[in-house]
Amino acid sequence: MKQTKKNWPESTFQFEHGEHQSGSHWEPFLDDVEVLLNKLPNMAEEASVQAGYAEFFPAERQIPENWNTGFYFAWPDRNHGLMLSIKIEKEQNNLSSMFPYHQSGMQHRIILDHVIVWENGVEAQIEARLGLGLITFYDSHYLINRAHYETEKTYEFILTAIVYYAKFTDNQKFNITHSDELIQNLNKLNLEYSIAKEMTVNTQGAAMLLPLSKGDEDEYQFSGTITKVEPLKEILGQTGWWVDATLMRDNKNEDKPIDFRMMITQRAWSETSEPCVGKDITGTFWLQGRLWNAK
């Protein structure tokens, strides 16, 4: 049966029912999130209302009137620290979530697949194509920019990976024995090289980005080679490093490396020596993003 093409917003937004995992978002910064919860009243008084892309470049359309609305508080400033997602309701405004945030990251051109709106209506994840891969990230500016979103459209997002745990990779070598049937089938492809019966595989330089088992869709296990290291200035009482690493390759563009920028705090780094360019690294992180360009 031929499916009827959906119009906006149904074509783009998928509304979910059920709870999402909060993950380990606070582990890179402190032992007990209660410390921050006890400071909420004072932080709310000192916080600034977060700004975003759509406030400077408004969308041509409006969100439906029956959608939940809200805004973000940013503390200690709009650039870094934590964000409070506030849901506007009839009787009072309610805190929907609190999460670590940093405006820095790496700019990526993505093709939007769909937006996963959480049950509270004021938080969302974006599923998008990056190269030939599919990624999901938490949209830290969803309430500000959602009217811009449309499936199959190309956007530029700033993606920031907040690392839960990271260490240098122990490079491994292992042998693979190919079956005669596999060798015959591969040789039929007229490759420029012959396939050997025995093959040695080295994990050095491998680029890997996989969903974290028992995690949410925006949490990943990663491995890759470090391409850049910069100091991380203090955020929520922690210092550390900004680390760029090649975690994907664009197979449709001559295997062009796709780097991600990761925030690695001292708490999240398990080695005694600092991250350095050229070394392989592995670990887990939470991926967040914000709209940078919708044109």
Image (spheres, rainbow, N blue to C red):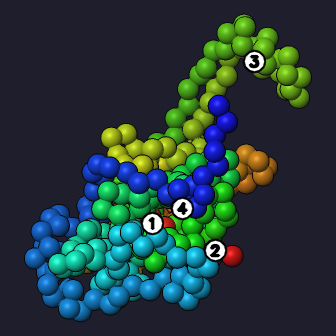
Tell me which amino acid carries mark 2. Ala
Q: Amino acid at mark 3?
A: Ala
Which residue is under mark 3? 196
Give the residue pinned by disc 4: 9
Residue 139: assigned label: 1
User: Is 254 on the left-hand or right-hand side of 82?
Assistant: right
Discs 4/1, front: 4
Q: Please rate how many residues cluster around mark 2, counting C-alpha atoms within 10 Å: few if below 14, some from 14 to 19, many from 20.
A: some
Q: Is residue 49 above or below residue 92?
A: below
Query: Please, what secondary structure does the residue beneath circle 2 have?
Result: loop
Q: Position of residue 96 (x, y in %)?
A: 25, 68
Mark 1 and mark 3: Cα distance apart in space:
46 Å
Q: Quadrant of the C terminus?
A: bottom right
The amino acid type found where label 1 is placed reads: Asp
Element type where label 1 sits in the image: strand
Q: Tell me if I can see residue 125 in this picture.
A: yes
User: Which label number is shown at residue 72?
Assistant: none
Image coords of residue 166 (percent x, y):
39, 54
Q: Is residue 225 above or below residue 45?
A: above
Position of the N terminus by quadrant: top right
Sequence-first tag of 4 and 3:
4
Compute the Cα span from label 3 to label 2.
48 Å
Q: Position of residue 20 (x, y in %)?
A: 30, 52
For marks 2 and 1, give the CA distance. Answer: 14 Å
At 45% from the left and 44% from the top, the residue drawn is: 211
Describe residue 202's horizontal placement relative to residue 81 as left or right. Answer: right
Question: Front-most of 91 and 99?
Answer: 91
Q: Nearer the viewer, residue 161 or 47?
A: 47
The residue under the point 30% across, 69% down is: 99
